[in-house]
Structure formats: structure tokens, C-alpha cells
Amino acid sequence: MDGAEVLVVGAGPTGLTLASVLADGGVNVRLIDARPGPVDESRAAIVHVRTLEAWQQLGIADTAIARGIPVREVSVHVAGRPLVRFPLAVPESGRESGAFAHALALPQNETERILAAAFERRDGRIAWRTRLLGLEQHADGVTAVVRDPAGAVREILARYAVGADGSRSLVRRAAGIEAHGGSYAPTAFLADVGLDPPPPAGVVHLNLAKGGFVGILALGPGRFRLFGALSQSYAARFDAVERVDPTTLQRWFDEYFGVSARISGIGWTSTYRIHHRLAERFRADRVFLAGDAAHIHAPAGGQGMNLGIGDAMNLGWKLVATIRGHARPALLDTYEAERRKVAETVLRNADRGFELEASDNRLLELFRRTVAPVVIRALVRLPVAQRMVFRLFAQTWITYRTSALATQHPKCTAGLHAGDRIAPDLLGIDVGVSRHRALLVSGEAVPDALDRLIRRFLPADPVITIDPHSPRGRRLAGEGPDRIILARPDGHAAYVGPPGDLTALGEYLDRWYVPPA
Ligand SMILES: Cc1cc2nc3c(=O)[nH]c(=O)nc-3n(C[C@H](O)[C@H](O)[C@H](O)COP(=O)(O)OP(=O)(O)OC[C@H]3O[C@@H](n4cnc5c(N)ncnc54)[C@H](O)[C@@H]3O)c2cc1C
């Protein structure tokens, strides 16, 4: 029988990220996957800004950027005519600006290889060809039954288990967690191809055509992802064959894309039904769900994989703090409270976006061709709308303000709010995903008592002082008074309050963390 502090089932993008965060915090993690290795297909091909920020903390953003293609814009057409362009790059004056100015096109097979290498650099080992067969909980842990690569059935004992095992999650079913949702009528289609002439890189090309939408994304030198909702007749034709033939694919392209180009070198193609589903709970005692195991939704906006990576960043440090004995057990409850709400919002937006793009409802189609172009064109000229669109895609809108873990002192009303994301340039993040940071926005030196108080509860780095009159200080505190900002390891503000009120900070720390005896 094997033992581990945390068993992570599934080495997709979610499980790999989580395993790295746990290993970073010195947790004994066992990562298993039924597959023989990382995926070969390009699948989720857009990495958004919030994910790049997480990867910077994991020390892999530079590698990802070197292997990907910057994506700065979405260009929307209606029946081949340009309608509007909106940014996937940070508007210059954006309050949310940070270290990453744009999204990244990176095939999921590359993403998984980079994430696997990050885990292995932390002495992690992925147990490929190891399938979970069943999972049971008991008072002080879980027992997983797995089949190993040699075909032997073994048990793994762990204090906690995380189901990052995708949309058909066995972990979810074994934990007795229901998931509710449904399926969309249109069939979705993906094809990785060469195009001549090549469309511009760095732009997602969308065309709203009769009966749905289609799009093009550059994946790498000479490689493009074609995606879209299929009409019923094309769905039947594509479904009926093992490999889509070049003539039929070219005909579909000519009919729907509003772009003139020859398709060559057809690589991976996939025809699939789109489902949307949300788990009722993300936790059952010692079992957690993350990524597609907890939520799946329409592909509008390419949010799915990014959402799972965000789950992993949120859950990872909480497990580290609990297992290391720094946190009170209630900290683990905040994972579901924070991330299920985020998933609900992403599902709602993706569903609405997909309905608008792909529904074959006649009224919606009429709206798409007549009213929507006028409204969208007018709106997207406004800088405020551009910022909103950027934030929506980039996932920089995600805040945990309403979480029990976010405490805003009544004396600090201006500037950054507890729960908000702290942009990397404000936080000064380098490598590291399991330590808190404390920022003191003040002209005064760090009081000894403050430093001592924080270190009594947390293995935090020394308090960083920031001049309140500097651009960084003003973005953090506005014109407000001096403040201390305690940043969680996942880059969100946990506590914001005046440095003079150490009682309030002490109460906060005592509510969530355990001082050493
Ligand atoms: C054909 C296709 C196209 C897609 N295209 C896009 C796209 O364009 N944009 C987008 O954002 N998303 C896309 N997605 C979705 C995206 O791939 C997922 O959102 C993302 O992979 C979720 O990551 P995850 O780690 O949560 O789950 P997964 O990547 O599904 O990983 C789950 C892992 O768990 C393992 N596993 C499952 N059961 C067991 C078991 N019993 N024992 C051991 N291991 C197990 C699996 O082998 C798998 O490796 C696509 C998905 C597919 C299938």
C-alpha cells in the first residue's frame, strides 16, 4: 500500500498545475493518470492573461511565451464583412495592467509538456498508465484503488484526494457529488490545417455566418486552428467519416469563413457535442473537484482550461497551508465558496456568448445580423467597454471580495480591495506559489511588531515597503491612508487595513491561521 499527503487524479492542465503548487509547498503529492503521457492534440489553444500570471509564479511563463504566439485581438465579421475588433491585449491605461500584455496561442499538448516539466523540476513524478478504479473516504483520509501500468490493482492512502480527472470524473461520482447541466444542439468542429495565403497571426478571426459562427486562430508557423459550429448537413457529413476529406473541408471553409484560402496538410480534427455542467459541490469532506471535473461549458472565449488552472492555484496553497499545519481547517471551505461562484459566472457568460454566436433560433439569427452589429460597433469604441471585454476574456475580473477570507478594514476605502487580484507588477511576484506576501504602503519603515505578527502565523517573506506617492503606491492605496496588504500565495489580497491597527490584523490571522505552539 502506497501513501501520500495528496492524491491528484488526472494529469491534464488542472492536475499538473495543482501538483506543482503542492510540490512547491513541500507536500508529498501523488499524481496519477490513465493516459500514457501528455495529450498529442492541440485542444485548448488559448492561454489568457490570468493564467500567464499563474505561470510566472510557477516559473514557466517565459518558456510558454517563447513557444506560443501572442494574441492581441479578436476580429469579428458578419457574413465576411468586418464588423468590429476588440482587444485581448491590455489597454495602455488599464487599471488591471500587469506584466502580461496579451493572451497567448499555445496548443494544449505544449501546455501539458511545459506543466509536466515544471512539476518534474520540483522532484514530482507523474504515474502515467495508472487508472483510478474507486475511491473511499474514512475519518482521516481516503483510500484509492488504482490499476498500475503492469495491470496490478493497488491501494493508495492519502489525507486528501483531488479529482482533476476531467468531465467524466470518477472522483466526482465516487464522492457522491451530482453535476447538473445539459447539451447544446449545434455540433462543434475543430481542424488544425495549413492555409494559403496565411491569415494574420495574433488575431482571432471570427465570422458570424448563416446558422452559426466559425473562426481561425494561428497555432504556430504555418498551422491554423479552424473552429466553429456546424450546420446540420455538415455535421452529418463530418460525423459519418473517420477523417474529414480535404474537398468537404474546403467546401465548408469557402461557404462559412468569408476568407479566401486553400487548405492543406489537415492534421487533428474533432467533431463533438458541447455540454455545460456544474458540480453541485466542489468538496465532499476530504475530496475536492477542480477543472473539467467540476465544470464544463461552451467554448466561447476559450475559458475552460484557464478556469481549471485558476482552480488549481486557489486550492493548491490552501492544501499546503492546512497540511503544513499553518491554517485552520475552515480555510479549505473557502475553495468551493470562491471558485464555484467564479465557475457559475464563466458558465453563464460562455453560454450566453455561445447562444448569441451559434444558436439557430430564427429570432437570435435576425438579431445577430441586424441589431447586434450596430450595438457592438458603437459599444466597442468606448475605452471602458474595451477594458471590460479584455478583463472578461483575461479572467483578471475574478475577485474574491465576498469571500469570508477577504477582510477590508473600514478605515481603508480607497484603492485595492481585499479579495481583488493584485497585478504582478504591484505584487512583485517572482517564482513561488505557496508563500504569503505582505506589502506596506507607507513612508515609514516596517514596524518590528508588524513583521513579527505576520511571521508568527505565516512563513511569509519579509514585508515589502512601497512609497505611497509612487505609481505603484497610488494604484494600491489610491489617495487613502497608509495600509498593510496581506497577499495570498495565489496573488489575491487577503487583508487590507491600516498598519497601526495590529489588533485587527492579529484577529484576522488568528481566525484563519494557527500560531506555532
Ligand atoms: C476535443 C477537445 C477540444 C477542446 N478544445 C478546447 C478549446 O478549443 N478551448 C478550450 O478552452 N478548451 C477546449 N477543450 C477543453 C479543454 O481541453 C479542457 O477544458 C481542459 O483540458 C481541462 O483540463 P483538466 O485538467 O481539468 O481536464 P482534462 O484535460 O480532461 O484532464 C483530465 C485527465 O484525467 C485523466 N483521467 C480521467 N479519468 C481517470 C481515471 N479514472 N484515472 C486516472 N486518470 C484519469 C485523463 O486521462 C486526463 O488526462 C477541448 C477538449 C476536447 C476534448
Image: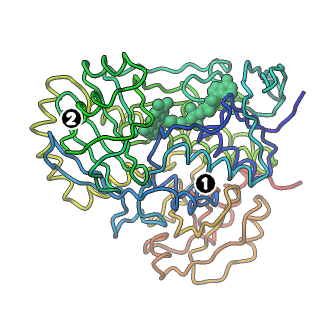
Q: Which residue is mark 1?
A: 490
Q: Is mark 1 within 8 Å of ligand 1?
A: no
Foreground pick, 139 / 249: 249
Check the image and report above or below for 112 versus 504.
Answer: above
Q: Residues within 10 Å of mark 2 (few under 14, many from 20)?
A: many
- Picture quadrant where residue 57 is located: bottom right
In the image: residue 252, left or right of residue 11: left
Residue 158 seen in this snapshot: yes
Q: Nearer the viewer, mark 1 or mark 2?
A: 2
Could you tell me which residue is drawn at 69 percent across and 63 percent down? 503
- State if disc 2 and disc 1 touch (CB < 8 Å): no
Q: Residue 247's spot in the image, x, y percent? A: 27, 29
Which color scheme did the rendering employ for the protein? Answer: rainbow
Check the image and report above or below for 14 versus 146.
Answer: below
Check the image and report above or below for 363 versus 335.
Answer: above
Q: Amino acid at mark 2?
A: Tyr
Check the image and report above or below for 339 versus 147.
Answer: below
Element at badge 1? loop
Q: Which residue is mark 2?
A: 256
Q: Quadrant of the C terminus?
A: bottom right
Q: Which sits earlier in the primary sequence, circle 1 or circle 2? A: 2
Image label count: 2
